[in-house]
Image: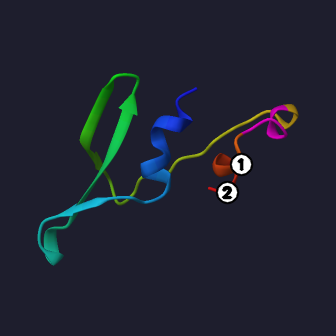
Amino acid sequence: MIYGSLYDLWNQNYIVVGSKENVKYFTRVALGAYANPMLYVSPNFKCILVMDEKNVASADPPLLNR
């Protein structure tokens, strides 16, 4: 699972770059030893997590809070 790599994104922990008229948002995504500290996040970005109901009880609580 990669959801642990996306916590900065889900926490809206963004690096804001640009002027008020041309603002861009970046976040960090880590996959194993690889980390991209400046991954662009579109203002229209949406993330939907689909999980089997039987797996909810064993899911990480921080994941369920997002």
Comparing 44 with 66, the one in front is 66
Amino acid at circle 1:
Pro
Q: Residues within 10 Å of mark 1 (few under 14, many from 20)?
A: few
The stretch drawn in magenta includes residue 25: no
Q: Residues within 10 Å of mark 2 (few under 14, many from 20)?
A: few
- Which residue carries the number 1 mark? 61
Comparing 61 with 45, the one in front is 61
- Give the image quarter of residue 53: top right
SS category of the residue bearing label 1: helix
- Give the image quarter of residue 51: top right
The N terminus sits in image quarter: top right
Number of marks in picture: 2
Q: Position of residue 28 (x, y in %)?
A: 33, 44
Q: Position of residue 13 (x, y in %)?
A: 38, 58
**Answer yes or no: do the residues labelled 2 and 1 have beta carbons within 8 Å?**
yes
- What secondary structure do most residues of the magenta stretch adopt? loop
Q: Is residue 24 left or right of residue 31?
A: left
Q: Position of residue 12 (x, y in %)?
A: 43, 60
- Which residue carries the number 2 mark? 65
Amino acid at circle 2:
Asn
Label at residue 23:
none
The C terminus sits in image quarter: bottom right
Q: Which residues are magenta?
A: 55-59
| Residue that lies at the very extreme toward the left in this rendered image | 19
Q: Is residue 22 left or right of residue 27?
A: left
- Give the image quarter of residue 19: bottom left
**Alpha carbons under labels 2 and 1: distance apart:** 6 Å
